[in-house]
Amino acid sequence: MTEVPADLVDALRSVVGEVGVRATDRLGAAHDASHYLLTPQAVVRPNSIEEVAGLFQTARHLGLGVTFRSGGTSLSGQAVTENLLVDVRRHFGSIEVLDGGAKVRCGPGAVLSQVNARLRRYGRKLGPDPASEIACTIGGVVANNSSGMACGIEFNTYRTLDSCVLVLPSGTVVDTSIADADLQLARAEPELHEGLGALRDQLRADPLAVERIRTLHAIKNTMGYGLNSFLDHTDPVRILEHLIVGSEGTLAFLAQATFRTVEIRPHVATGLLIYPDLAAATASLPDLVAAQLATVELLDATSLRVSQRDPKSPEEIRGLMVEDHCALLVEFQEPDEQALQDRLEAAALLWERLPLSRPAQLTTDAGRRAAFWHTRKGLFAAVAGNRPSGTTALLEDIAVPVARLGETCTALTELFDTYGYADAVIFGHAKDGNIHFMVTETFDGESPEELDRYEAFTEDMVECVLARGGTLKAEHGTGRIMAPFVRRQVGDDLYAVMEKLKALVDPHQMLNPGVLLTQDPRTHLKHLKTSPRVEEEVDRCVECGYCEPVCPSRRLTTTPRERIVLRREIARAEAAGDAALAQTLRREYEYEAVQSCAVDGMCETACPVFINTGDLVRRLRAETRSAPDQKVWKAAARQWTSVSRAGSWALTAADHMPSVLPRAASDLARRVLGEEAFPQWTDDLPRGGRARPVRQDAQAEVLWFPSCTQTLFGAAAGADPDGRRSGVGEAFQRLCDVAGVRVRTPESMPSLCCGTPWKSKGLSEGYELMRSKVAAAVWEASDAGRLPVVSDASSCTEGLEALLLASGEPVADIEVVDVVTFAAQRLLPALQARKLLPAPMKPSVMLHPTCSSTRLGLNSDLDVLAAAVAGQVYTPQDWGCCAFAGDRGMLHPELTASAVEAQAAEVRSVRAAVHASTNRTCEIGMTRATGEPYRHILELLDDAVLPQGRGRTPEEPS
């Protein structure tokens, strides 16, 4: 790997504040969701339009190309480069809802699902609805003219873009929303303004060109530039505004986009039509389109088999004995209940006529509908994750007239057989004649015949699609993969117009060279990504990037995708004999990927192939743990009662000292022992907590497993209505007493822990000791598993569940319930039945769901409890894991600060009356970030109990 010249670094840093040139920066950004791999010279993160304009000037002077990257979910190679890569995720993510939701203004780094989350309260959404909405961003949506499953070409990006702010290659800023935008463009860029008008007139004067453009855009089409802009718009500024759509970053930087939104039709019915084969399914499409279904999504037999491996997939898929079956996922969307019933009644006759393998059943149940769409939206990555280790997934994206989709699928299947692609998969948006198909190859440089096979297959595929009046790229963008075929798609004359357009707007060919237009007929065969075998989590990853928006370290260091691809790059360097590069990557990886990972597992909730990068990080931590470390923490596990109490006493002592003393002591310890070994004390930490109680009751109906965080950390500052300083443990005991629920704990409770501190740090010996202690104690105290176990901290619930599962049967079968769910399902109804809860006593509550409550599925129960104690319940729209992660927020405070920056600002702006969460350390982290005292939701429920129901205060054990 070549070093970046110092003068280039200096030049870039003179105009942009954030410039990454380390091996980790460059190789981590070399990967996106496509099957291309190019290493940029630098990764640049401008934070303003002015910095972008300055970067353009510098790049022109240096003769370097500039490529933009946001979500990194593009599949055609348009977001990778050997020049300068501009990452806009960190500083261009603004979202502003306008006109009561009728419009929304966004930065290019705004994630599509987050935009829709803000619009949902207005009953609106964006028109484009790609399956990758969980991770794709506005910049990519505009750059690729994204469409999706329901929007067709009527509500795609091109049709719903209202205005935008652009930075041209010259540095000129164009705001198309202002009234005299066209006049401003003419004054600032007279040649460009005149040239756009000339191309408009040229095309409009040619009837054959007009007819060809209309035909090309009558179906989904993202091949080349959108020349329909010259026919649909007259003013040059409006032409330019819409040419940006689908231009893949080759004409300008999109600094801001404003969309006209579409109405959400809230009454929905979804179902799976299962056919005996692909031909039968596609033959029914004209009737299904005529039935005015909002979506008709195709899943072939291989898609169904892969989906069956997902435990979250619907029973209709998991229970199917797949042979040659094909399924169509269909959905009606209507504005009211009566309209939906009318649709369903009319469709009942259609279902009877269709050659279905099973009767059609559409559901309005939100949970079942979500399961269908979970499967469909994660399908590409799930199928790609199913590929053999070491191979590369190659996804194509075509559209043909709907009437010709069946014969096209048949022809493609014949091509798969001809070229030996036995694992090929077909799925996609059948309603629009738009399908995706995936094959796998091994591009290892040792088998040139495989590259020859792929080249020949691509050539025949192009002929197959064009012969049927289709487009070679429907919605994924031309990129590198189809750039050599644009001329064949549009013809020589229209291709010449595209070349003139590029030269007019970007005369120095600076923006995204090699993408969309190219003179190299083999561009699509160069820089193909290889996937060296590394380890199980790494080998399954398809680099889709779905994990990135939920990762708490994404704005500080690396994301789960980057953690994985850097492991691949280390393996690649070692295989190439580049020991220096491998050593550099390993050194940088320690903080960037290992120390700064919260191991919260949120990545797994978004990953279509269920990779928990935290598992990888935990294993890496274990591999680097020294024998003395293991011994010390094993001793701590053996003497946990004393160790946890010592931690409590230390915090209480620090609470009584001048803050300068404990701060200086912790700083000294961190310098001597290392930042990973000793936490940083800050004056916002609470004093120590109380020893956990031991309760014995032969008639108990639950076994309580109080978290040791109650010993380490005292309750939040403040008092309950009776003046007591309370915590979740005391609140739980009082609520159980009032509700008539009898509980007990293991006799050795003060010495037990869920094991998370050891597991998260890779301290395997201490974890194993604690696991055996807990398993034995819980088995005995639960009457051999008869009693369910209730844990009062969500991370401990998750940790305890994993610990018991690791202990094997019969211990693994013990039911573990989080106190939030137990309270919502058992305590709250009892309190209400006894009339001990008044109307909500607080005007509002701000919730912080945790990563564990999300992974465990507790958040709906959290909402139920919150509604019982407060009139209004808020959850931040910018919610995410706080990354406090036990002691991670004390070892690396910068991690929590970065993770919750946006969320904290939203919390402060709402000014709720009270703030609640489900885990003590998360409460500490959010209190630190927002300045608002967070308490466990059970403490608020306990506060709300009427005085006559408030029993004795649970006695503090000696």
Image (tube, helix red, strand yellow):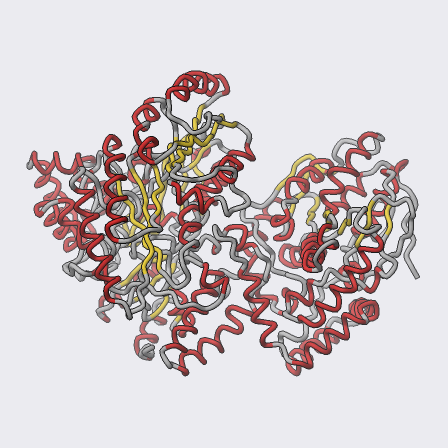
Residue 262 on image: x %, y %: 40, 32
Residue 900, compared with residue 352, is above or below; it is below
**Viewer-nearest residue: 900 or 790:** 790
Observer-nearest of 645 and 776: 776
Residue 150: image location, x then y, percent: 37, 34
Q: Does residue 933 appear in the picture of this structure? A: no
Q: Position of residue 371 (x, y in %)?
A: 52, 38
Residue beneath the point at 87% across and 50% down? 744
Residue drawn at x 68%, y 52% as measured from the top left? 932
- Seen from the viewer's position, the closer of residues 451 and 228 is 451
| Quadrant of the frame with the N terminus | bottom left
Name the residue: 39% across, 41% down: 301
Find residue 665 and report its image quarter.
bottom right
Q: Image quadrant for the C terminus?
A: bottom right
Looking at the image, residue 129 lies above or below residue 52: above
> In this rendering, would 711 be left or right of 74?
right
